[in-house]
Amino acid sequence: MENYNPRKPMNLRRRGIYLLPNLFTTGALFAGFYAIVQAMNGKFEPAAVAIFVAMVLDGLDGRVARMTHTQSEFGAEYDSLSDMVSFGVAPSLVMYEWALRGMGKWGWFAAFIYCVATALRLARFNTNIDVVDKNYFQGLPSPAAAALVAGFVWVMLDYGYSGESVRWYAVILTLFAGLSMVSNVPFYSFKTINMRKSVPFLVIFLIALFFLLIFSYPPGVLFGLFLCYGLSGYVMWLVQLRGKQSS
């Protein structure tokens, strides 16, 4: 039994840490750490794959917390710190070690821009979570930006390109991903999709085909998907801008 503390209000409940959702967050954090270690050892393909694993685990922790009613302030803060490692530090270091190291100050400058943009993106998301439109993200989400960077490394390695041969493309992509995170460009959030709603059989068949497409060639398909998503926000922004000008 807890010892009585006269200076501790009796109506305050002791804050606990829920195990299940934080296990997924810890797994995502470990995947990001593993990506960094593999990049330092020159093993860039497993490093890129680890970032995608972190992305999957990060997508599960919040859903598990909501399904099991185990949301907590600790979990939200822990998730944000995990995201900074897995989707900020890890992708920037993987890209730097693979393609940007030999570029001098331009290399670490591009990697740092991405890293600090992730920190700013996460801080803005945490402070604006109750005031922004739930249907859209303000700026490119950090997991999508990380997948864009990791996907580029993975697909280039699969085609046999060295980081040095595509380093300027790597710089452009890294800066694009970083600046997109701190932009005001809207990106569809997919939060309006109701997973509990019944759907036609055709939808299930199309989802199966979608996963089949991914497994047919993971590096190319995943990179293509996230590249399209990264460009979709700018297309949406231009459409909205054109609509305002014509009205």
Image: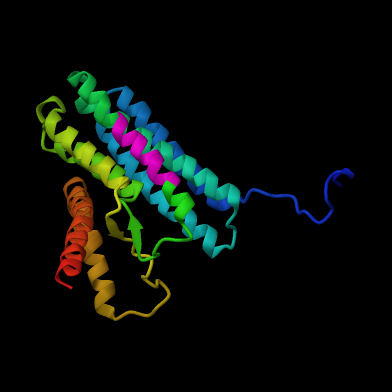
Q: Is residue 160 left or right of residue 86?
A: left
- Give whichever of 147, 187 is nearer the camera: 187
Residue 157 can be seen in this image: no
- Give whichever of 220, 103 is nearer the camera: 103
Taking the spot 22% from the left edge, 37% from the top edge, the residue there is: 175
Pinpoint residue 138: horizontal percent, then vertical percent.
Answer: 34, 55
Pinpoint residue 126: horizontal percent, then vertical percent.
Answer: 47, 50
| Location of residue 168 (image quadrant) | top left
Taking the spot 81% from the left edge, 56% from the top edge, the residue there is: 11
Where does the magenta region start and end?
112-123
Taking the spot 51% from the left edge, 58% from the top edge, the residue there is: 64
Question: Above or below — where is 57 with respect to 202?
Answer: above
Q: Is residue 99 left or right of residue 122?
A: left
Residue 121 among magenta residues: yes
Work out which quarter of the rendered image holds the C terminus and state it. Answer: bottom left
Give the main secondary structure of the magenta stretch.
Answer: helix
